[in-house]
Image (cartoon, grey):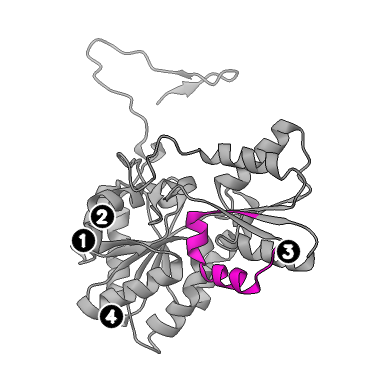
């Protein structure tokens, strides 16, 4: 065994003769492991899961990228929101009796509550669904403020919804065991089961080529559009959407030495920024209020378009920047191309 000098961190290795063939290797339990998306996908298929639907998430982007490139169109649906994903998955099960997979970020768990409790529950239609949930705001991990409370409450939310869960291991043998447990439960109870996915669980997998984004070279980049909006409306209240848009507005204001006090950066509650802006415009009828939205967020709660149009305020301006991808979570297509 190596010994250590009292004052140094370097080990003193024992003297070796020419015949000493011993090799010193690092302990395998200290080597970081990652779950290969292709291997995980193969495990799901071995249990009969061939249908996938959900909303992309940054913690699941490698898995989502693999699914996007390797699952036929009719067997993969990037949904408008997490609730519609659960409902679509339920339809697949009703038609095929094969257990579907729904993927989402835990911030979208609230959108699944209604279809899980009033559609998939054993007290209603008994529909098994494998839910793969990116665990943002995991306790003990540094994350953005909008994820911290959601991360803390995610396990208890699943318990209150009567959805059993397990944590997906980051190595193949562990994933195999957890999936055996999950599918045994779903097949017996005919009810949903959730897998929580921690940060950096999956091995890297990058989308190759264009996945539905606009490719017109003459189109403006999002940051160029935001620069024009800020220049044209320098003092009007801005309500900006989730993701890169709010981050870039903040950076542009700082770069120009402008105040942030008239901006509301919607860092959470994806899909609701136009409703926030509408509420401000209703309360300040003499002030022009601008909402700067994105396609992925706007699609998530498009009913807000009907509400905004019905109210018909002349001081409410809704600007939608459409790049046809979920840009901040991996670049999967939104369907808006």
Q: Of helix, strand and loop, which one carries label 1?
A: helix
Q: Residue furthest bottom?
A: 123
Mark 2 Cα within 10 Å, few/some/many (few <14, many 20+)?
Answer: some
Circle nearer the viewer, 2 or 3? 3
- Residue carrying label 1: 45
Instruction: Report if the CB atoms under discs 1 and 2 are less than 8 Å apart.
Output: yes
Residue found at x 43% / y 64%: 80
Instruction: Report if the CB atoms under discs 4 and 3 are less than 8 Å apart.
Output: no
Q: Of helix, strand and loop, which one carries label 3?
A: helix
Give above or below for 108 relative to 114: above
Instruction: Report if the CB atoms under discs 2 and 3 are less than 8 Å apart.
Output: no
Residue found at x 39% / y 89%: 124
Mark 3 Cα within 10 Å, few/some/many (few <14, many 20+)?
Answer: many
First-in-chain label (2 vs 3)? 2
Query: Could you say which quadrant of the image residue 273 lies in?
Result: bottom right
Extent of the magenta region? 291-314
- Residue 281: numbered disc: 3
Mark 4 Cα within 10 Å, few/some/many (few <14, many 20+)?
Answer: few
The answer for how far apart the CA atoms under marks 1 and 2 are is 6 Å
Q: Do we see residue 187 in this rendering? A: no
- Residue 212: numbered disc: none
Q: Of helix, strand and loop, which one carries label 2?
A: helix
> In terms of secondary structure, what is the magenta stretch mainly?
helix
The answer for how far apart the CA atoms under marks 4 and 2 are is 22 Å
**Image check: 178 left or right of 2?**
left
- Residue carrying label 4: 188
- Residue carrying label 2: 41
First-in-chain label (4 vs 3)? 4
Circle nearer the viewer, 4 or 2? 2
Circle nearer the viewer, 1 or 4? 1
């Amino acid at each position: 065994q190596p010994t250590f000098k009292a004052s140094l961190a370097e080990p003193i290795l024992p003297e070796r003769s020419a015949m000493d063939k011993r090799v010193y290797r690092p302990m395998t339990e200290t080597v970081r492991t990652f779950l290969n998306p292709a291997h995980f996908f193969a495990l799901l298929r071995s249990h009969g899961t061939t249908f996938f639907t959900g909303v992309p998430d940054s913690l699941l982007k490698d898995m989502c990228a693999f699914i996007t490139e390797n699952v036929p169109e009719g067997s993969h649906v990037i949904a408008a929101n997490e609730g519609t994903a659960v409902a679509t998955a339920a339809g697949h099960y009703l038609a095929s009796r094969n257990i579907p997979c729904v993927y989402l970020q835990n911030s979208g768990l609230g959108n699944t509550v209604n279809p899980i409790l009033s559609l998939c529950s054993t007290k209603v239609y008994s529909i098994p669904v494998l839910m793969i949930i990116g665990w943002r705001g995991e306790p003990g991990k540094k994350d953005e403020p909008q994820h911290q409370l959601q991360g803390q409450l995610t396990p208890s939310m699943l318990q209150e919804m009567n959805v059993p869960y397990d944590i997906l291991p980051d190595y193949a043998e562990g994933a195999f065991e957890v999936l055996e447990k999950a599918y045994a439960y779903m097949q017996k109870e005919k009810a949903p089961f959730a897998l929580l996915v921690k940060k950096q669980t999956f091995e890297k997998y990058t989308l190759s080529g264009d996945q539905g984004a606009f490719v017109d070279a003459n189109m403006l980049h999002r940051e160029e559009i935001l620069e024009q909006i800020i220049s044209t409306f320098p003092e009007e209240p801005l309500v900006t959407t989730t993701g890169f848009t709010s981050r870039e507005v903040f950076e542009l204001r700082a770069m120009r030495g402008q105040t942030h006090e008239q901006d509301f950066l919607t860092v959470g509650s994806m899909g609701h920024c136009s409703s926030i802006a509408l509420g401000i415009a209703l309360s300040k009828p003499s002030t022009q209020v601008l909402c700067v939205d994105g396609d992925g967020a706007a699609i998530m709660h498009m009913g807000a378009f009907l509400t905004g149009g019905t109210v018909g305020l002349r001081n409410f301006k809704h600007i939608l920047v459409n790049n046809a991808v979920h840009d901040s979570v991996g670049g999967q297509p939104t369907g808006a191309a």
